[in-house]
Image (cartoon, rainbow, N blue to C red):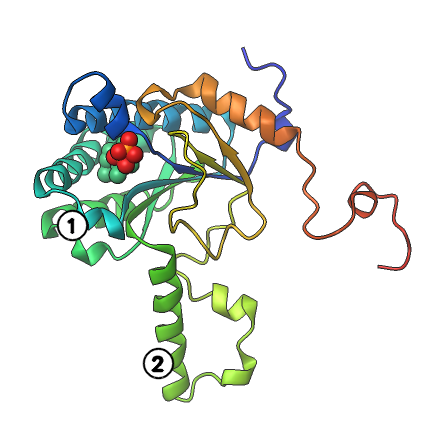
C-alpha cells in the first residue's frame, strides 16, 4: 500500500499540529465537541499508523496554553477525551511497546488527569518501540522561558556560569531533552502557522501542511506526508553539493 516509502528514510521524529476539528464539525452543523471526538479517532489511527511505519517519536499538539481560553465546556471535553484515551488505549499502547511522555505545564490540568498522565508515563517507561509525546498545556515560548528560569536558578546557586551557556546546554533544559528535534512537522486544517509549537526544536524541521481537517486524517495521509518528506533535500544551511557529498572544498 505504501511500497514507495523508503524504510531507511522514515523520519525519526514526526510532530503534528492536529488542527481543524472545530471547522470539521461546524461544516457538518454539529458541535465542536463532536469534532474533537472524531479527532480522537484520527489520533488513535495515526498513533497506530506511525508505529507500523517505524516512526521513532511522534509528538502530538493535544492542548496548547492558549487553549485554556476556550469556552469552559470545550476545555472540559478535551480533558475528558484525554482522560478517556489514557483509560481505553493504555493497554494497546503497552501491547505495541509504546512509551508515553508529556511536555508542557501539565500541573494546570485537573489533578486526576495529571495523575493519570504520570501513571501512564511511569507504566510505559521501559517500552522501546516508539515514543508518543503529548504536548499538553504546552507553549513553545513558555518552554523557552521555563528553560531560562531553570538556568537562572542554577546560576544563582553557582552551578553554572552565564558564559558557559551554549545551545547544547540550553536545549538540555527544555521539557524533555531526550527527545530529538522533529524531522517533519505536519499541520492539518489548511493553515500555514506554527502556532507556538516546539519553537526551539523546529529550527531545521521540514514542514508539511494539508487542507484535510484533522478528523479526516488517517494512515494513508500520514504516508502521503512521509512520501513528500522523502522527496526533500535537507541541507541544514549547507549547499546542495555539500550535502550530496560533492563537496566544494572550502566550507
Ligand atoms: C485544534 O483544532 C485542536 C485542538 C485544540 C485539540 C486537538 C486534540 C485532539 C483532536 C485529540 C483529543 C484530545 C486530547 C487532549 C487527547 P481546532 O479546535 O482549533 O479546530 P478549528 O481550527 O477548526 O477550530
- Mark 2 nearby-residue class (10 Å; few <14, some 14–19, many ≥20): few
Please give left or right for residue 49 compared with residue 112 in the image: right
Image point (51%, 45%), residue name: 182
Give the residue number, with chain letter if any, for mark 2: 153
Please give left or right for residue 62 compared with residue 221 in the image: left
- Mark 1 nearby-residue class (10 Å; few <14, some 14–19, many ≥20): few
The disc, 1 or 2, on the residue closer to the chain's N-terminal end is: 1
Query: Residue 115 has which mark?
Result: 1
Q: In what quadrant does ligand 1 lie? A: top left
Q: Nearer the viewer, mark 1 or mark 2?
A: 2
| The N terminus: image quadrant | top right
Callout 1 touching callout 2 (CB < 8 Å) = no
Judged from the image, the secondary structure of the residue bearing numbered disc 2 is helix
Q: Residue furthest right?
A: 249
Taking 93 as reference, is 115 above or below it?
below
The answer to whether mark 1 is within 8 Å of ligand 1 is no
Amino acid at each position: 500500500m505504501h511500497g514507495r516509502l523508503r524504510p531507511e528514510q522514515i523520519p525519526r521524529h514526526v510532530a503534528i499540529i492536529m488542527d481543524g476539528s472545530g471547522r470539521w464539525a461546524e461544516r457538518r452543523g454539529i458541535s465542536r465537541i463532536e469534532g474533537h471526538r472524531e479527532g480522537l479517532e484520527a489520533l488513535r489511527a495515526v498513533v497506530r499508523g506511525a508505529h507500523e511505519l517505524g516512526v521513532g517519536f511522534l509528538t502530538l499538539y493535544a492542548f496548547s496554553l492558549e487553549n485554556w481560553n476556550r469556552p469552559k465546556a470545550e476545555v472540559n471535553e478535551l480533558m475528558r477525551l484525554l482522560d478517556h484515551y489514557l483509560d481505553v488505549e493504555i493497554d494497546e499502547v503497552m501491547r505495541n511497546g509504546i512509551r508515553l511522555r508529556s511536555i508542557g505545564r501539565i500541573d494546570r490540568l485537573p489533578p486526576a488527569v495529571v495523575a493519570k498522565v504520570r501513571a501512564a508515563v511511569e507504566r510505559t517507561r521501559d517500552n522501546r518501540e516508539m515514543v508518543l509525546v503529548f504536548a499538553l498545556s504546552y507553549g513553545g515560548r513558555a518552554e523557552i522561558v521555563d528553560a531560562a528560569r531553570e538556568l537562572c536558578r542554577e546560576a544563582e546557586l553557582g552551578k553554572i556560569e552565564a558564559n558557559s551557556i551554549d545551545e547544547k546546554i540550553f536545549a538540555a533544559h527544555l521539557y524533555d531533552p531526550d527527545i530529538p528535534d522533529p524531522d517533519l512537522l505536519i499541520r492539518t486544517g489548511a493553515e500555514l502557522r506554527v502556532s507556538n509549537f516546539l519553537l526551539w526544536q523546529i529550527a531545521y524541521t521540514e514542514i508539511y501542511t494539508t487542507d484535510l481537517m484533522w478528523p479526516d486524517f488517517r494512515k494513508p495521509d500520514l504516508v502521503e506526508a512521509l512520501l513528500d518528506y522523502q522527496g526533500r533535500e535537507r541541507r541544514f544551511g549547507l549547499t546542495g553539493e555539500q550535502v550530496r557529498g560533492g563537496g566544494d572544498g572550502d566550507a
